[in-house]
Amino acid sequence: MKHYVKNGEYIALEPDPSDSVMVTQQEDLQYIPEDVPIGTIAFTAGYKKIWQKKIDGDWETLVG
């Protein structure tokens, strides 16, 4: 994991886009920049909830 969202702020630990982003809840998806690559995975701790960025830019629930 290279990036995460905390308190409504997207934190990039490395300057290039990551293929995964840790979030605390589904509402945090809105804070992930639109330019993250298609296929990016967003997840909560323990992978209890997982979303993937679709080709159209929306987030698909994989585990929820």
Image: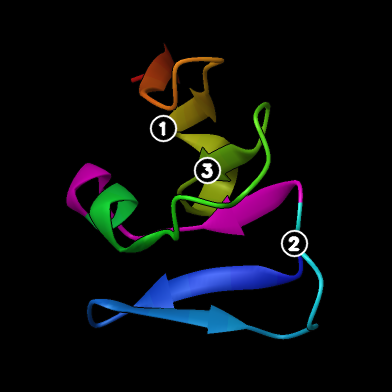
Percent x, y for residue 39?
Answer: 68, 26
Q: Quadrant of residue 18?
A: bottom right
In this rendering, position of residue 64 left or right of residue 39: left
Kindly identify the amino acid type of the residue bearing the numbered disc 2.
Pro
In this rendering, position of residue 55 left or right of residue 60: right
Q: Quadrant of residue 47?
A: top right
- Relative to residue 41, is residue 28 depicted above or below? below
Q: How far is the residue under mark 1 from the one under mark 2?
A: 21 Å
User: 6 or 46, which lies in front?
Assistant: 6
**Residue that badge 1 annotates:** 49
The tag earlier along the polypeptide, 1 or 2, is: 2
| Residue displayed at 41% across by 32% down | 49
- Which quarter of the image is occupied by the C terminus? top left
Percent x, y for residue 16?
Answer: 81, 71
The tag earlier along the polypeptide, 2 or 3, is: 2
Percent x, y for residue 31?
Answer: 31, 63
**Residue that badge 2 annotates:** 17
Kindly identify the amino acid type of the residue bearing the numbered disc 3.
Ala
Q: How far is the residue under mark 3 from the one under mark 1?
A: 8 Å
- Which quarter of the image is occupied by the N terminus? bottom right
Using the rendered image of the protein, determine whether residue 63 is visible from the camera's viewpoint.
no
Marks 1 & 2, CB-CB < 8 Å contact? no
Label 1, residues with CA under 10 Å away: few <14, some 14-19, many ≥20: some
**Residue that badge 3 annotates:** 42
Label 2, residues with CA under 10 Å away: few <14, some 14-19, many ≥20: some
| Residue displayed at 78% across by 82% down | 15
From which residue to which does the magenta span run? 19-27
Mark 2 or 3, which is nearer the eye? 2
